[in-house]
Every structure is written in structure tokens, then in C-alpha cells.
Amino acid sequence: MIRKESQELLKEIASLCNQASEEIEDTDNTNEILCLCDKLVEKIDDLEEEEQTLLLATRICDHLSDGYDDEEYRKEGEETLYKELKKLNNSNILKSTFENLCDRIDDLEFIKEASKN
């Protein structure tokens, strides 16, 4: 499922691609093409950051969930967490810490499952 924000970014990317293809027909517009390409790269980066934030919010909720009685609030909790995480840039120490904690929990769950076999 693509989030509304992601859909908007994809529309902007498509628009920039269309503009670039129109500019390519006129070779005198090299600078304009390069500017459009730079904007395109920025939008793709924004989209990747958005998807990484959504994935982190989902991972945190996965690790906090007991899988039973809290599932009715999961979507709301995930959305709230996503909105708060989105306020932080990817290099923020809190965001990095959450990612590292999720990685550690994944590792521990893997070890636990492997030890059962």
C-alpha cells in the first residue's frame, strides 16, 4: 500500500520526468535538463526516506506487539509513530537508536529460533 505522501512524491517524480523528456527534444536546454534531473534525484531520495521511516515505524510496532489484544490499535499506533519519526531526519540519534534496537531484537529472535532446532 502506497501512502498518500508517497503518491504525491511519485506524481512529482513523474512530472519531472515528463518535463525532462520535453526538454531533451531541445538540446539548447542542457542546464534546464540538469536542474530537472537534480530535482528528480531529490524527490527519489525523499521517497526513499519516507519508505524507510514507514518501515521503522512498522518494525517498532512489530516488536512491541504481543500479536493479540493490542492489534485493534496497531494501525493508529503505527500512524502516530510514523508521523513522529518523520519529523526526525535519518541521521538523528533517536532514529538511529530505534533502528539499532530493532536490529538487535531481530538478531535475538533469530538466535532464539535457531536454538530451538
Image (tube, helix red, strand yellow):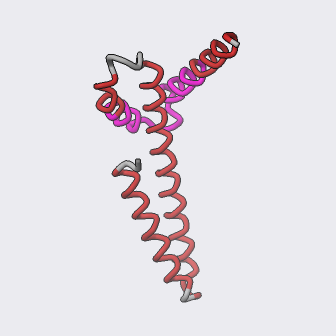
Q: Is residue 93 magenta?
A: yes
Quarter residue 70 falls in: top left
Which of these two is toward me, 80 or 116? 116
Numbered label tally: 0
Q: Residue furthest front?
A: 117
Above or below: residue 116 compared with residue 50: above
Please name the residue shown 51% across and 76% down the image: 20
Please name the residue shown 40% across and 33% down the image: 85
Residue 6 location in percent, x, y?
40, 52
Residue 34 location in percent, x, y?
57, 72
Quarter residue 64 falls in: top left
Residue 66 location in percent, x, y?
41, 16
Above or below: residue 108 compared with residue 93: above
Q: What's drawn in magenta, residue-wise?
A: 79-104
Please name the residue shown 54% across and 89% down the image: 26
Q: Is residue 35 magenta?
A: no
